[in-house]
Amino acid sequence: MRNDENGGAQLPPDTPLDGRADASVVTQFFLLPLAVVAGLLGVFLLYTLATRRVPTARDYLETLRSGRFNQRWQAAFELSNLLKKKDASVGDPGMLSEMVKIFQESVTSPDEDPRVKRYLALALGDSASAQAIDPLLKAARGEDSETRLYALWGLAHLKAVEAKELFREGLTDADPTVRSICAFGLGVLSEHPDLTDVEPLLKDPVPDVRWNAALALARNGSASGESVLIELLDRKYLDAFPGLKSPDKTELILNALRGLKHLKTHGLSEKLRRLANADPDPNVRKAARSWDISDPS
């Protein structure tokens, strides 16, 4: 502070007229109002999240009926996820009938988005309902090769005995994915069909086909694919297939263990010990330990 010509006190030229520092003025007129706005916005967002209704299976069905192009296939995808998870919202008694009707309409419509048909086929496969079998059978006989694959997958997951002949026909299909799905489908049928026509697939040039054939045979008590399943216990062998992700490898090992255990395969002590002690996945370690590793067999 300094005196003016008349001896009065004069503020430095950069001091606000009311005597407060610049930072104080900025805080009052800018930062504080901004903080208030941010706080109100945060409260609004929290309220929105708290009150937002999670879409149900019925909501996705309505979107399939009247939604726009991209909305419809996304709704079919979400619906398939709900059915896979056995979500409570799929318990509506009339919902499955509506879904079957939408699927039938989509399969016969030349302008339908293929993704809608395929995700609905997955959804029907996870529905555990006999209502889904007939429309999936028709789709599996259709001309759309991709929808056919998804329909065959759905029939396999439904363990549809009605699809037995379709599965048998598919064992010699030019598409290896069809061969693989059909081998799996025959393997899970509850009536334990004769699987002698699956055995040639143990020499299929495509590994996935060999694996599913061996698993199908093991489920039905045939040890003809035993050597294929033993190969699957080796992670180094599976690492040679770059398309396999870690969860895929784990699932293959677990399925092979189930198949070999069902067959009561001998001579696996060392492999089981290695899996029980050193495999990176805890589920594999647990499954390997469920065998009596001390047994010399």
Image (spheres, grey):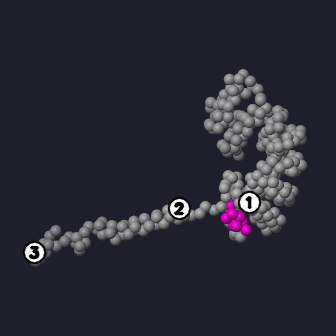
> Where residue 116 is drawn, which disc sits there?
none
Along the horizontal axis of the image, is 107 left or right of 20?
A: right
Along the horizontal axis of the image, is 3 left or right of 215?
A: left
Q: Secondary structure at mark 3?
A: loop
Q: Nearer the viewer, mark 2 or mark 3?
A: 2
> Where residue 7 is drawn, which disc sits there?
3
Q: Amino acid at mark 2?
A: Ala
- Give yes or no for residue 273 being in the magenta stretch: no
Q: Position of residue 26 (x, y in %)?
A: 33, 68
Q: What segment carries the magenta color?
A: 57-65
Does the image show residue 83?
yes
Q: Nearer the viewer, mark 3 or mark 1?
A: 1
Mark 1 Cα-neighbour bin, 10 Å: few <14, some 14–19, many ≥20:
few
Q: How many labels sit on residues?
A: 3
Q: Earlier in the sequence, mark 3 or mark 1?
A: 3
Q: Judge by depth and name the residue closer to the eye, 8 or 232.
A: 232
Q: Quadrant of the N terminus?
A: bottom left
State the CA–CA distance, disc 2 to disc 3: 66 Å
> Where residue 93 is drawn, which disc sits there?
1
Q: Quadrant of the C terminus?
A: top right
